[in-house]
Amino acid sequence: MEICRSKSEMRRATATMRAGGAQRIGFVPTMGALHEGHLGLVRLARSQCDRVVVSVFVNPTQFEDPSDLEKYPRDDARDMDLLRAEGVDAVLLPAVEEMYPPGAQTIVETTGLSRVLIGALRPGHFRGVATVVTKLFNIVGPDAAFFGEKDYQQLAVIRTMVRDLDMPVEVFGHPIVREPDGLAMSSRNVRLLPEHRVEAPVLSRALERAEAMAAAAPVTIDELRADIALTLAEAPSAEVDAIDIQDAQTLGDLDGPLDRPAVILLAVRFGAILLIDNRVVSPV
Ligand code: PAF
């Protein structure tokens, strides 16, 4: 497995892959602190492509809170071991100065999608994501790229950006990977206090109940939201930032009876840690 710390090393590595006959290069962008969710993306990439490249870069421009950036878990040595064991061909592991040389001033933004929902709670977040993913695509030059569906809005932002800017990259989503108790895997989970970790599966419980409710009988958006709020209240430490129920395709607002597939997007804080989870529910 080749570890590339500079953009030029990475470009050379993918050029060598193509010169050696690689037909399809798959790319998995990550911020490290890898878990089974990321490894699922790597395996999906491997099943679709003949070479797999992963990036490990904690992107400062998508953090609006400097202490969140500082505390983001990092363990490059462990990450490299995990990726080597998965048979990854090359890793891009750049320093911040390599990705953002002084004077950088160009940004990429999906102007509608990036300002609603999580984007309204975390201004600038999706602009940072879209900008770094564009840069990573330009450096790696992949044919396909793989993202987790846990970050539902992020995936929508990336699909929209790829479409709008005619990027020659096929985007794949991978279903959420969960702990045995239902908690969606996230690099943030390790930072939960033990008492919060016990309560955190309340997000997936709330989504399961809402899905069952929608499948059992006709239901309104307000009834679904009320049921979710009731379940989340079972966790005394949970501070609910958002229970958004949106059109699953467009992320537009919904009201009245549930009459089309909707995505429920939860953002719930446990102490300083913001957890997100989602599920698409359909009417009976
Ligand atoms: O999902 C993530 O880990 C990040 O947002 C991404 C896509 C690697 C961009 O920094």
Image (tube, rainbow, N blue to C red):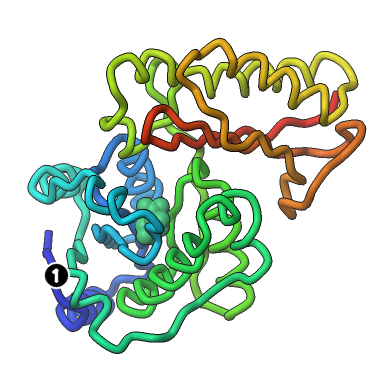
Check the image and name the residue furthest to the top.
234
Residue at 19 percent across and 50 percent down: it is 87
- Tag 1: amino acid: Cys
Where residue 187 sits: x, y (%)?
31, 39
Q: Quadrant of the C terminus?
A: top right
- Residue 191 visible? The answer is yes
Residue 269 is situated, as x and y percent measured from the top left of the image, at 46, 32
Q: Is residue 33 left or right of residue 125?
A: left
For the question of whether residue 28 can be seen, the reply is no
Direction from residue 245 to residue 201 in the image, left or right = left
Rendered-image quarter of ligand 1: bottom left
For residue 4, which quarter of the picture? bottom left
Nearer-the-camera pick, 19 or 113: 113
Q: Secondary structure at mark 1?
A: strand
Percent coordinates x, y for residue 60 in the rendering: 31, 63
Q: Is residue 252 above or below residue 208?
A: below
Residue 106 locus on image (x, y percent): 43, 85
Q: Nearer the viewer, residue 192 or 174?
A: 192
- In which quadrant is the N terminus drawn? bottom left
Q: Is residue 254 left or right of residue 206?
A: right
Q: Nearer the viewer, residue 164 or 120?
A: 120
Q: Which residue is mark 1?
A: 4
